[in-house]
Amino acid sequence: MYIMHSPSVQRIPLTLDKGTGFWSLKRELPEGQFEYKYIIDGEWTHNEQEPFTGPNKDGHTNNYAKVVYDPTSVDGATRERLTREDPELLEDERLKLVQFLETCSEAEV
């Protein structure tokens, strides 16, 4: 299964979680509205169980995801903290980095 999104019209494969049976795609997106359609067995379709647009000027109906920047969310607060001029890692973040680096060989680092 693939997903197509506008405006760049990229064909992106989805990942099947065999445990849950759900297809998914994880991406960092900037604030805005993103329209997409699914390609299932070569057929373009939208999912009526997800938010979708009405037919556009070309007669197409698309699903959409709306991304809103929320600095009060956990992700927003973390992004804000780590991307400012003087970023600050929390103790558990430092520990995770140290553990990760200790598991890597020198060739991987």
Image (cartoon, rainbow, N blue to C red):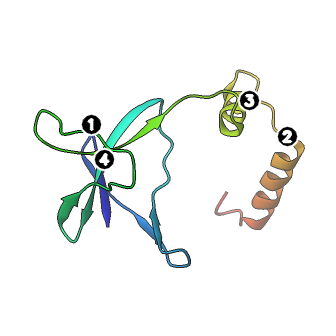
What residue is shown with label 1? 7
Q: What residue type is labelled 4?
A: Tyr
Distance between the alpha carbons at the discs numbered 4 and 2: 36 Å
Distance between the alpha carbons at the discs numbered 2 and 1: 37 Å
Between label 2 and label 1, give the one nearer the viewer: 1
Q: What residue type is labelled 2?
A: Leu
Q: Which mark is residue 28?
A: none
What residue is shown with label 4? 36
Residue 69 location, quadrant: top right
Q: Which amino acid does label 3 sit on?
A: Arg
Secondary structure of the residue carrying tag 1 is loop
Q: Where is residue 30 in the image (x, y as percent from the top left)?
A: 47, 32
Q: Residue 81 carries which label?
A: 3
Between label 4 and label 2, give the one nearer the viewer: 4
Observer-nearest of 108 and 24:
24
Q: Earlier in the sequence, mark 1 or mark 3?
A: 1
* Crowd rating for badge 4 (residues with CA inside 10 Å; few <14, some 14–19, many 20+): many
Q: What number of labels is visible?
A: 4
| Residue at the (71%, 62%) spot, across then down | 106
What residue is shown with label 2? 90
Left or right of 24 on screen, residue 75: right
* Crowd rating for badge 1 (residues with CA inside 10 Å; few <14, some 14–19, many 20+): few
